[in-house]
Image: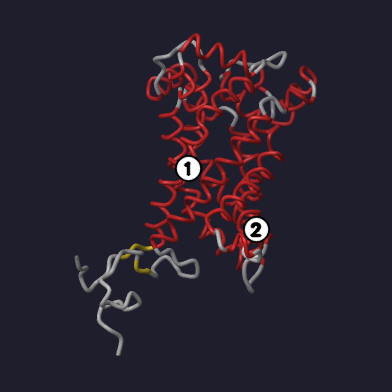
Amino acid sequence: MTWPDDDWSLSNSQITWCSGTISGFAATLSKQPIQRVKWIRQTSEGPTRAYSAIVAETVQTRGYRGFFAGSAAAVYRNVPHSVLVYSLYPHAAALSRRWLSRDGETFSSRFVAGYMTMVGATVVTHPLDTLRVRVSVKQSTPTSSFLGEAAALRRAEGLAGFYGGFGATLVGAGPRGAIGFGVFETAKPLAAEHEWLRERPALAKVVCGYVAGLCSESIIYPLDTVRRRQQAFGAAHPINRLSVFAALASIFRAEGLGGLFKGISLNLIKNPAATAVSFTVNDVVKDFLGYRADGDDDLRRTATLPLPVDKDPLSRSGKPPP
C-alpha cells in the first residue's frame, strides 16, 4: 500500500480535539463504578454511611448495572469537558509564558495556564456536570435518563437549577486545574532524568499524572463536597441558599471535619487514577498524531502513519531527499 505524495496531516487544534475526546472516554469508563459509590456517600447527610451498605443497597435496588448508572451522563459531560481542557491549555500556556516567563515554561506559568483552562471549561460544562450528578446519585429511579433529568430539572427549578453548586465548582476548578497541570507538566521532565522511567515513557506519564491528581484532589476536596451536595439536593435545600464558605462552615458544624472529607478514601484511588489515564491517553494520542508542542495552530505536522520503506518519512513529498 502506498500513500499519496501529500501526506495526511492534522492541525494542532484538530489533534487536541481527537486526544481530548479519546482521553475523556477512557477516564470516564475507568472510574464510573467507584465514582457512583463515592458520590452517594459524599452527598448523604448525617452519619457517614459505610461503603458496604451503599454497595449492598445499590445491588438490591438496581442490580450490578446500578454501579454504572449515570455513565451516559458522565460521557455527555466528560468528553466535551476533556476536549475543551486539552484544546484551551496550549493557548493558555502561550499566554502565561508571555506574562510570566518569556524564557520558557515554569511551574508558575503552567499553574496559571491550568487555572485559566479549568475555569473556562467549567463555565461551559457545569450544567452537564449537574445533570451527571443528579442521574448518578438517585437510587430509586432506575429509568432516570440524562434528557429526562434535564427536562425535570428545567420544570422544577428553571435554568438556575443547572448551575447548582456553581460557586463551589468555580472556586475549586481553578486550583484543581492549576495544580494538576502544574504538577504534571513539571514532573514530566523530572521523570525523564531517571533512566528507568526514561526507558518507559508511557509509565512515566502515568506516574506523573497520578501524582498530579493526588495533589489536586486532596487539596480541593472540601469544596468538592459542597458542590456535589448543592448539585444533588437541588435549589430547595438550605445548603443552596448559603455561600461556598458558609456551606463549608455549616457542614463542619453539623458533621465535623469528617463531613467535609466524606468519600475521600475512594477519591484518592479513583481521581488520581482517572487523572493519570486522562493525561497519559491525551499525550499518547497527541504524540501519535504528530502534535507540535512548539508550533502555532496554523503549523501542521505529518501524522504518524506507516510509509513504504523506499520513502523518507521526513520528506513532505515522499521522494528521496537530494
For the point 44% across and 22% down, which residue is it?
Answer: 154
How are the colours assigned in the image?
secondary structure
The vertical placement of 61 against 299, above or below, is above
Residue 187: mark in rendering? 2
Left or right placement of residue 221 versus residue 90 in this view: right
The vertical placement of 48 against 174, above or below, is above
Give the mark toward the camera: 1 or 2: 2
Left or right placement of residue 183 versus residue 307 in this view: right
For the point 25% across and 77% down, which residue is it?
Answer: 310
The vertical placement of 19 against 235, above or below, is below
Q: Amino acid at mark 2?
A: Ala
Disc 2: CA contacts within 10 A as few (<14), some (14-19) or many (>=20): some
Percent coordinates x, y for residue 39 in the rendering: 59, 24
Mark 1 to mark 2: distance in Å?
23 Å
Quarter of the picture containing the C terminus is bottom left
Q: Earlier in the sequence, mark 1 or mark 2?
A: 1
Percent coordinates x, y for residue 70 in the rendering: 45, 25
Res 255 → quadrant: top right
Q: Amino acid at mark 1?
A: His
For the point 41% across and 46% down, which residue is it?
Answer: 22
So how many labels did they put on this image?
2
Mark 1 vs 2: CB contact within 8 A: no
Give the residue number, with chain letter if any, for mark 1: 81
